[in-house]
Amino acid sequence: MKKEQVVNCQFSVWYPIFKKHTIKSLILPLPQNVIDYLLDDGTLVVSGSDHNTEQTHTNNRDPESEEDIQWSDDETTTTVTAPEFPEFTSKVLEAINSLGGRVFPKLNWSAPRDANWIALNSSLQCHNLSDIFLLFKSSDFITHDLTQPFLQCSDQDSPDPVISYELVLRKWSELIPGGEFRCFVKENKLIAVSQRDYTQYYQHILKQEEQISHAIQEFFSQHIQYNFLDEDFVFDVYRDSQGRVWLIDVNPFGEVTDSLLFSWEELVSSGEIAQQQVRGSRVFCSTGFIGHWTVSVSHGVCAVRAQEGPAFRYTTSEVTVQPSPCLSYRIPRDFVDLSTGEDAYKLLDFLKLKKSQQEDSDEQEVDEEGENAPQ
Ligand SMILES: Nc1ncnc2c1ncn2[C@@H]1O[C@H](COP(=O)(O)OP(=O)(O)OP(=O)(O)O)[C@@H](O)[C@H]1O
Ligand SMILES: [Mg+2]
């Protein structure tokens, strides 16, 4: 994967080409002071208002700039007023309103999918800039976009292209995960399609595999093929309840993109995609032909191939449902509830527990003092 391929997969590059086939979106240039704020690794405490966002810093700041700082009890922690971006804030609010008041935010390539647990609604749905900042500042995927977008490129010797960072606001859409598929294109040919949410079994995919694969191939040949700037790329689609296919995203053809039920080895290899190997230790065994389709099922993953068409893989009921891929980014739910005060009973239990622990340790201290007291 070359740096140029990554550049071509930026939202602002592909959106104008495929505008008619994707969710309505607006692109706002990200000012440098907002980028600096996003990269500042202080802990963010969101107040709920777009103008009074407070931030707690634990890093060492310039002692000259302390006017706004109130020192707290803990000597290493300072509370400072978060910077304000009035002009940018009003542009963002205007954009959100024109998209119906609820948006899905992204940067040039990534959405903060690894941070949805931190949002009060446990979702990427945002209503204002504070919602967006909370997600962006908590996301490693966003930091990756800002700091090392070309990390996995093969042409490391060439200079990094200059990137203009952008905030992408997409109209919020209720997408059903079972309707999402990832499509791999090599040399302008659709070679593979994978269920996107591969950790779950969706009965309708099993029942409608032929229609789904056919609809995606038709969408590709009519609207995508030869229209993109590269001949190798990955695109994500959504098939809605009426069977209409929509473009969701375009991603680089390489390791930086999750290969889901395929492996990058098989996707880049020059031969036909073997039915033999998929993600980890899963092995396919061919079970025969259904019309002009070759179907293989093994260990909960089904691979279907229309002759001449792409390999199509999805999870069947045999699989043990796996945890969500972003789970490892989370902290325990109790911690979130306590820190946000979301669950008042949990907070009360926690305070009671703390109080009784304190009383226990006070009693112990008195006992110990008693023991050590001179006879
Ligand atoms: N406009 C939208 N409204 C609601 N949900 C959305 C919207 N766009 C995308 N999503 C959901 O968010 C998920 C991630 O979106 P997207 O593919 O744009 O993020 P990404 O960071 O590029 O992901 P990846 O790293 O897998 O390429 C999608 O699979 C979809 O479920
Ligand atoms: Mg993507």
Image (tube, helix red, strand yellow):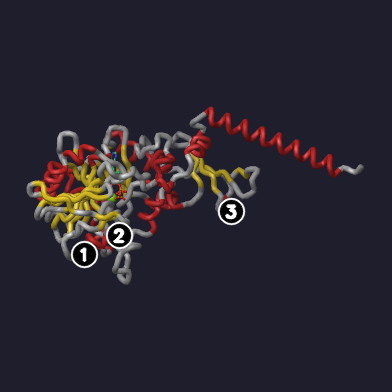
Q: Name the residue carrying label 2.
A: 255
Residue to which mark 3 is pinned:
64
Res 4 → quadrant: bottom left
Q: Are marks 1 and 2 in contact (CB under 8 Å)?
A: no
Q: Residue 284: where, in percent of width, then height?
A: 23, 54
- Asked whether the residues under the numbered discs 2 and 3 touch, taking CB atoms below 8 Å apart as contact, a structural biologist would say no
**Whole-percent x, y for residue 88 in the image:** 37, 43
Name the residue beneath numbered marker 1. 269
Circle 1 SS class: loop
Picture residue at 19% right of the left edge, 48% below the top: 16
Q: Quadrant of residue 184?
A: bottom left
| Cα gap from disc 1 to disc 2, whole angstroms | 13 Å
Q: CA distance from mark 1 to mark 3?
A: 58 Å
Which residue appears at 35% of the width and 49% of the height? Answer: 30
> Can you name the residue that lies furthest to the top here?
345
Could you tell me if residue 190 is visible in this image? yes
Q: Going by the picture, which residue comes out furthest to the left? A: 291
| Horizontal arrangement in the rendering, residue 123 relative to residue 231 (left or right) | right
- Secondary element at tag 2: loop
Residue 6: give x, y in percent of width and height.
27, 59
> Is residue 339 left or right of 263 when viewed as pictured?
right
**Disc ID at residue 364:** none
Q: Name the residue at the bottom extreme.
A: 157
Q: Residues within 10 Å of mark 3 (few under 14, many from 20)?
A: few
Residue kind at label 2, given as amino acid type: Glu
Q: Residues within 10 Å of mark 1 (few under 14, many from 20)?
A: few
Q: Residues within 10 Å of mark 2 (few under 14, many from 20)?
A: few
* The N terminus - image quarter: bottom left
Identified at 87% across, 42% down, the residue is 373
